[in-house]
Amino acid sequence: MQSPQPMMYAMSWYLDLVTPGWDGLIEDNYQAVMPLIGAKKFGIHYLYQPPFCQQLGVFGKNTSTDVVKSFLLAIPRKYRFAEIMMNESNKIDLTNAEMLTNITLQLGCAIENIRTGYNENTRRNIRKAEQNKLSVYKGFDIENIISLFKTNKGEALGKNESWYSTLKTLSYQLRHLSLANTFCAMNQHNEIIAGILLVEFNGRAVLLFSGSGSEARETGAMHFLVDSILKDICTSHQIFDFEGSNNENLAKFYLGFGGKKSSYPFVRINRLPFPVRWMKGKGLDHSQISAK
């Protein structure tokens, strides 16, 4: 299968790491594919979006509206419910499909050119970080970044031990494949106060995970860190992918670097029995997908 915009999320080895036992739909001789991530609960088979996979859906040379619809129609009927984040090349005209936001920044030029797109808040926070004498360490320190996230956000976001275990396994395997590094902001006492796991795939640098604490917010550490990463990779990559966000505050942070919004579809299929169907929200059925 050859996709004009390949994403690491759809690579078989990546899916094996985040969701072993996944399935998929294949058109002809891998002209197009669609990963299916299934599970079973209370006797009901369903499809879900696995962790650390922002976009899935249909990948191939042709991902027209008709092709995407044909894949959705081909999802086995045993799956009574599905929530799938498609990808940016999947253009669909379905009434109940929700559009989600991604933010990316075009690279392939000098850092001075990129910095012209920063807003004043971003510039001010970078200056604040410099005044606080922060420094950046590039290496692989995922454990400390996870610890920062767990302490400051993990409980509020409801992350469980299985999620952290998957993150660690994925991080170390990506590092083993020479696809991942971490960038950490250090204070004057050489303590990590913020960190980012950056994955580099096919010219695309993806901000896959980050962690920070109160000191990072007070010192502008995350703005300083992203600027340092952009300086490091700006001429060797084509795209910096912020991986979102539908969170208004995060989106504002990303857009402050000159990032641009794009959208990708979120599709829900709801064929649950009537008594529980309403609990999961409106979803598509075969008649709606096949309708012209």
Image (cartoon, grey):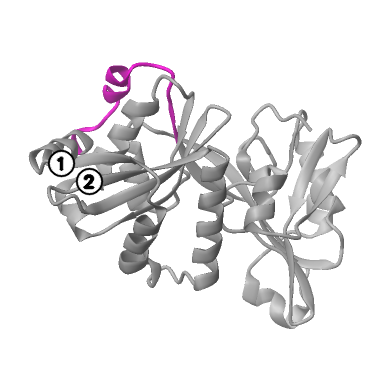
Instruction: In the displayed orientation, state which residue is furthest to the left.
Output: 131
Residue 10: image quadrant is: top right
Which residue is located at x 83 percent, y 55 percent? Answer: 75
What amino acid is labelled 1 in the image? Ala
Q: Residue at x 51, y 44 (%)?
A: 175
Q: Position of residue 126 (x, y in %)?
A: 18, 37
The reply to whether residue 291 is in sight is no
Q: Is residue 4 on the magenta stretch?
A: no
Q: Residue at x 78, y 76 (%)?
A: 44
Spot occupied by residue 188 in the image (x, y as percentages of width and height): 12, 47
Quadrant housing residue 87? top right
Image quarter (top left, top right, bottom left or bottom right) of the N terminus: top right
Say if residue 24 shows up in the picture: yes
Tell me the tag on residue 129. 1
Q: CB of mark 2 within 8 Å of CB of mark 1?
A: yes
As drawn, is 206 to the left or to the right of 65?
A: left
* Magenta stretch contains residue 108: yes
Q: Which residue appears at 40% of the width and 27% of the height?
A: 233
Seen in the image, is 288 located left or right of residue 8?
right
Q: Quadrant of the C terminus?
A: top right
Q: Which residue is mark 2?
A: 221
**Residue type indicated by callout 2:** Ala
Residue 237 spot, x, y in % from top left: 47, 24
Q: Mark 2, residues whose alpha carbon is within 10 Å: few (<14), some, or many (≥20)?
A: many
Range of residues picked out in magenta: 104-121
* x and y percentages locating residue 45 in the rendered image: 78, 71
Q: Which mark is residue 22?
A: none
Horizontally, residue 140 falls left or right of residue 162, namely left
